[in-house]
Amino acid sequence: MDYRRIVILTGAGVSAESGVDTFRDKNGLWSKIDYRDVATPEGFAANPALVHDFYNMRRRRIAELEPNDAHRALARLEREFSGEVLLVTQNIDDLHERAGSKNLIHMHGEHRSALCTHCGDRSPWEGDMSLETPCPACATVGHLRPDVVWFGEMPYQMERIYDALRAAGLFISIGTSGNVYPAAQFVQEAGRAGAHTIELNLEPSDTFDDFDEAVHGPASRVVPSYVDMLLKS
Ligand code: APR
């Protein structure tokens, strides 16, 4: 197993054991609130206060939580692996960074970032945000929104991600249900380019059949042991 380049995709499941809600599991976020109200541009236009409350609540909640052994194992892989490791996360939380990951793409944005729809500025953000909050760059009011990629919007850094998938020797998918595109299609992209593909998930995902291999169980257990194996090989 001589993988020069590894691309890792993570989803909400990698942060579940840290206390971050997943979306589609039993009691997941989308079973409690309609995603159309809080995760679409239309929902934001219809009720920006509701959307700001939702992400303010998430921002406060995530600030109280800590990375788990899965996050730490991935940071260790990046540090100790002799080849290249790129971590692409669908998560908006900062637990990968707090665990030490550096070569990281937040394809769906970040909860600790603000986006101004007037000047396009994206600024690091702490605390609550509202319609009254002025943009840190252009100072206009009423245009600030959470810097999160909503349904129907284009994820970030897609060209860089596809270039990495096409050059990968190993593609690892962790804690994602394979419901949301384009992320759910990454396994095919990497597989077509010759990468070995593996799913590490609590249960088989919707794209389970597209993988060469799978290990099912909680991320905090299966990710550290898989990383151990990679670093020993
Ligand atoms: N360890 C490993 N996997 C887990 C764990 C765990 N402890 N707990 C849950 N999972 C798995 C579930 O089995 C499920 O397959 O994580 C997956 C979570 O799936 P979703 O809730 O659909 O989350 P995700 O795939 O990240 O959603 C993708 O959808 O709502 C949008 O933008 C949002 O980025 C998100 C995207």
Image (cartoon, rainbow, N blue to C red):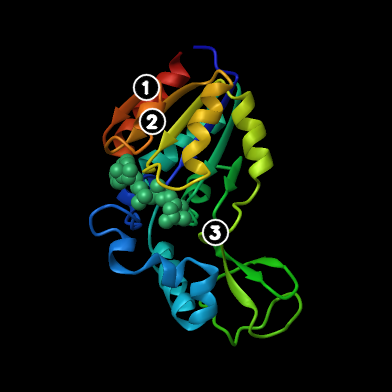
Where's residue 49, x and y in %? Answer: 48, 83
Q: Quadrant of residue 215?
A: top left
CA gap, disc 3 to disc 2? 26 Å
Q: Nearer the viewer, residue 20 or 163?
A: 163
The answer to whether the residues at label 1 and label 2 have Cβ atoms under 8 Å apart is yes
Q: Is residue 33 left or right of residue 119?
A: left
How many numbered circles does the render carry? Answer: 3
Residue in the image at 40% along x and 37% along y:
174
Where's residue 26, x and y in %? Answer: 23, 55
Q: Is residue 110 left or right of residue 64?
A: right
Residue in the image at 33% along x and 58% along y:
21
Q: Would you name the residue on which mark 3 appears?
A: 152
Q: Earlier in the sequence, mark 3 or mark 2?
A: 3
Where's residue 75, x and y in %? Answer: 50, 37
Residue in the image at 50% along x and 56% along y:
92
Q: Would you name the residue on which mark 2 appears?
A: 199
Q: Mark 3: give few (<14), some (14-19) or many (20+) Cα within 10 Å.
A: few
Q: Is residue 22 left or right of residue 194?
A: left
Q: Would you name the residue on which mark 1 appears?
A: 213
Element type at mark 1? strand
